[in-house]
Image: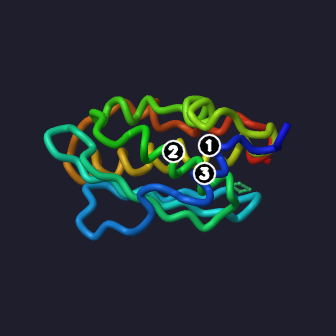
Amino acid sequence: MALYSEKVMDHFQNPRNVGKMDDASGVGEVGNAKCGDIMKMYIKVEDGIIVDCKFNTFGCGSAIATSSMATELIKGKPIEEALELSNQAVVEALDGLPTHKIHCSVLAEEAVKAAVKDYYDKNGIEYDKEKFAQTHDCDHCAE
Ligand code: FES
């Protein structure tokens, strides 16, 4: 079996929604201290819906594929739904990732959350701080 699914290879080679957004409603930047990879996520929100989403990832192929898939999954969705996006959902949508690459998907989840948090902060919207607690749950990057 190939190490990476066709979907992972597709999103790595043809990442969706790459770029910068000048008029973003929220921007989130996260990094993985261990591997040094960085992900920046931009969301544009209108009437509570994420109407556009872009990302830039300075990182590994799995980080690129997971951030690409994450943008696809949250685009057009209510902002609360984006907040519920888990790294497992991103991995499932990509038909899996090798175990040692799961932490890359955690970065995608955290980038989305950071962008939502920035949007809430900028607009003075109250939110449950628990939802933004550190979400790291893998052995590879929590060290
Ligand atoms: Fe760092 Fe994938 S190795 S995010």
State the quadrant of the N terminus: top right
On the image, which quarter does residue 23 sit in? bottom left
Kind of residue indicated by mark 2: Met
Say which element carries label 2. helix
Position of residue 77 relative to residue 33, above or below, is above
Mark 3 or 2, nearer chain start: 3
Q: Is 143 on the left-hand or right-hand side of 60?
A: right
Kind of residue indicated by mark 1: Lys
Between 42 and 13, the one lying in front of the other is 13
**Marks 3 and 1, how far apart in space?**
5 Å
On the image, which quarter does residue 33 sit in? bottom right
**Marks 2 and 1, how far apart in space?**
9 Å
Residue occupying image coordinates x 58% and y 39%: 134
- Picture coordinates of residue 15, whole percent (x, y): 52, 57
Q: Is 31 on the left-hand or right-hand side of 117?
A: right
Mark 3 residue crowding within 10 angstroms, few (<14) / some (14–19) / many (20+): some
| Coloring applied to the structure | rainbow
Where does label 3 land, which residue? 10
Mark 1 residue crowding within 10 angstroms, few (<14) / some (14–19) / many (20+): some
Numbered tag placed on residue 7 in the rendering: 1
Position of residue 38 relative to residue 47, above or below, is below
Residue occupying image coordinates x 44% and y 43%: 113
Residue occupying image coordinates x 25% and y 55%: 25
On the image, which quarter does residue 79 sit in? top left
Where does label 2 land, which residue? 69
Kind of residue indicated by mark 3: Asp
Residue occupying image coordinates x 54% and y 59%: 14
**3 and 1 marks in contact (CB < 8 Å):** yes
**2 and 1 marks in contact (CB < 8 Å):** yes
- Picture coordinates of residue 111, whole percent (x, y): 49, 50
